[in-house]
Amino acid sequence: MALVPSYIQRLANYKPGKPIAEAQRELGIQNFIKLASNENPLGSSPKGLAAIEHSLTNLHRYPDATGYELRTKLANRFNVKIDNVVLGSGSEGIMSTIMRTFLLSDDELISAANSFIGFRVLANASGRRVHWVPMKNYCYNLEAMADKITDYTKIIYIANPDNPMGTTITRQEFDEFYKHVPGRVLIILDEAYYEFAKDSPNYPDSMSYRYDNVITLRTFSKAYGLAGARIGYGFAHDSLIQNLMKVKVPFEPSLTAQVAGLAALDDEAFLAETLQVNKKGMAFLKQEFDALNIHQVPSEANFITTVWDSEEKASQLTQSLLENGVIVRQLTGFGWPNCIRISVGLESENQKFIDTLKDIL
Ligand SMILES: Cc1ncc(COP(=O)(O)O)c(C=O)c1O
């Protein structure tokens, strides 16, 4: 259709991990376990849920467009000013605002090929030229990304840890890369899985090394189990935040999202349990994969990617697991068709997945 720009026509629809209801419809099986979307297997932060319940009588009111309370709390928590904090409908909501705020018509973007699909969708939908730089050993190849910087470069996106590989870049690697990045280029450091990675010795928490042209993005979707509420936040220099605040959809994030985030931040018990369940589950999966001689990519997040001989093998396995009630994610849409990503679940879910996998193999 002539009114649709060609770069939009060329886009493919985003295909998320298979929802349980869809799998139930298709296969007539009732009891699925879903290890496909890096969600929190414990559910949501109870404090976040209680706050949502309390907010229901206020849903006829618009939310605070400035997100004052949650931004203040985040600012205090992370030792910055409220002017350094932005909120969004998930961290993807903020990425979308970033695209609309900073890109001029000739600007270009740089990121890793086959990394987070959410960014790929937004970058391609921007209609700008994007340099997708192949990964090296399943990690961001920052050296090769630096080589792609030109006078037109405006945004560089780095997911740390990466999704779908779970690999991280170190502070030293980032600093070396940063030497090549002009101050007029914005770096998005997407730390959606920060809470899971933060205790790992090589993981650099970007709040401890601030640069004026870096925006750190984080989310309540994963560690706080609020993916469905859509609430994320970002930290950056006040001049960047000021302009993002002008462009963001005025009443984003929703009232329920804001109150849930505010309460969840105080839910230390839930966060601790989440990290504990993930740590144990990850250790179990790694050990079982080793025992089965399955090639796995070392992950610092709440999921782990396995590598198979061929696309056919990965596809057959994913389908057989599905037919046996386990939903995992073959990474075809990401550009890794011979890989399968497994989100860490509850102990019983991890066990069922491994038992089913053994039966199939
Ligand atoms: C690297 C990465 N960034 C961002 C997100 C999305 O986060 P949100 O739910 O806050 O939009 C995800 C979700 O899977 C992710 O893997």
Image (cartoon, rainbow, N blue to C red):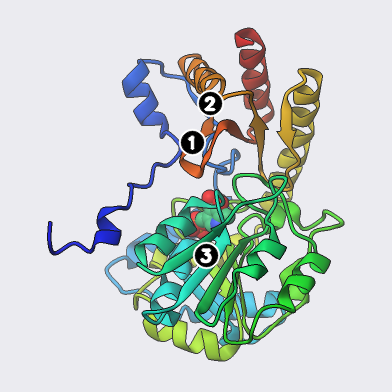
Q: Nearer the viewer, residue 99 or 252?
A: 99
Please state, as top left, top right, bottom left or bottom right, where the N terminus lies in the image: bottom left
Seen from the viewer's position, the closer of residues 3 and 169 is 3
Residue topped by disc 2: 311
Disc 1 packing (10 Å; few <14; some 14–19; many ≥20): some
How would you rate the neighbour count of disc 2 (Cα within 10 Å): few for under 14, some for 14-19, many for 20 or more? Answer: some
Residue 330 falls left or right of residue 203: left
Which mark is on residue 171?
A: none
Which residue is rendered at x = 35% and y = 15% of the image? 28
Residue 12 visible somewhere in the drawing: yes
* Mark 3 beta carbon near ligand 1 (under 8 Å): yes
In this rendering, the label closer to the viewer, 2 or 3: 2
Q: Which mark is residue 332?
A: 1
Alpha carbon of mark 2 to alpha carbon of mark 3: how far? Answer: 34 Å
Front: mark 1 or 3: 1
Q: In the rendered view, tell whether residue 174 sits above or below residue 274.
A: below
Q: Secondary structure at mark 2?
A: helix
Q: Which residue is mark 3?
A: 232
First in residue order: circle 2 vs circle 3 = 3
Q: Percent position (x, y) of residue 264?
A: 59, 60
Q: Is residue 299 left or right of residue 31?
A: right
Q: Is residue 186 left or right of residue 94?
A: right
Q: Residue at x 27, y 68 (%)?
A: 60
**Position of residue 59 measured from the top left corner of the image (x, y, whole percent):** 31, 65
The outermost residue toward the top is 359
Q: Nearer the viewer, residue 194 or 180?
A: 180
Q: In which quadrant will I find the C terminus?
A: top right
Q: Residue at the spot x=79%, y=59% of the render?
A: 203
